[in-house]
Amino acid sequence: WGVVTAEFDDGALALSRLNATRLVVRFQDGTLIDTDLCDNLPPVCDLQGITADSVGVVLALPLLSANGGNLDDGRDSERPRRWKQERV
């Protein structure tokens, strides 16, 4: 498990914004995230308020709920959901 590929927009970094352009990650539970195939990229992160010379970036997924409710269908939710509903 780990990061297979992580690519970021250099132009956005020059503007203090972290913008991933490609991610391929295998999580410890076996979940594969591949933005080339089907997964969405994370939102752009604003770095303007950070004063450190280096920043750690953490990739994570919400925990699965055994009782269901793992799909974000656009309604308000108290917790993050594992998958997001999207019509194509």
Image (cartoon, helix red, strand yellow):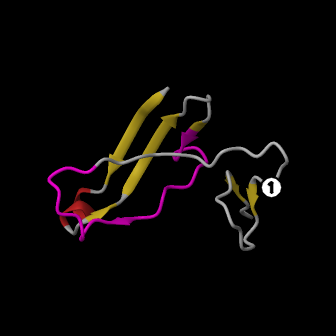
Residue corresponding to mark 1: 69
Left or right of residue 15: residue 74: right
Residue lying furthest bottom in this view? 76
Residue under the image location 48 percent in, 38 percent down: 24
Quarter of the image with the C terminus in it: bottom right
- The quadrant holding residue 46 is bottom left
Q: Which residues are magenta?
A: 33-55
Residue at image x 41%, y 46%? 58
Asked if 61 appears above or below 47 in the picture, the reply is above
The answer to whether residue 60 is left or right of residue 65 is left
The residue lying toward the viewer, choosing from 27 and 22, is 27
Identify the element where label 1 is drawn: loop
Residue 29 on image: x %, y %:
62, 29
Q: For the residue marked with disc 1, what is the amino acid?
A: Gly
In this picture, residue 12 sits left or right of residue 67: left
Question: In the image, is residue 85 above or below residue 24?
Answer: below
Does residue 85 appear to the left or right of 12 in the view shown?
Answer: right
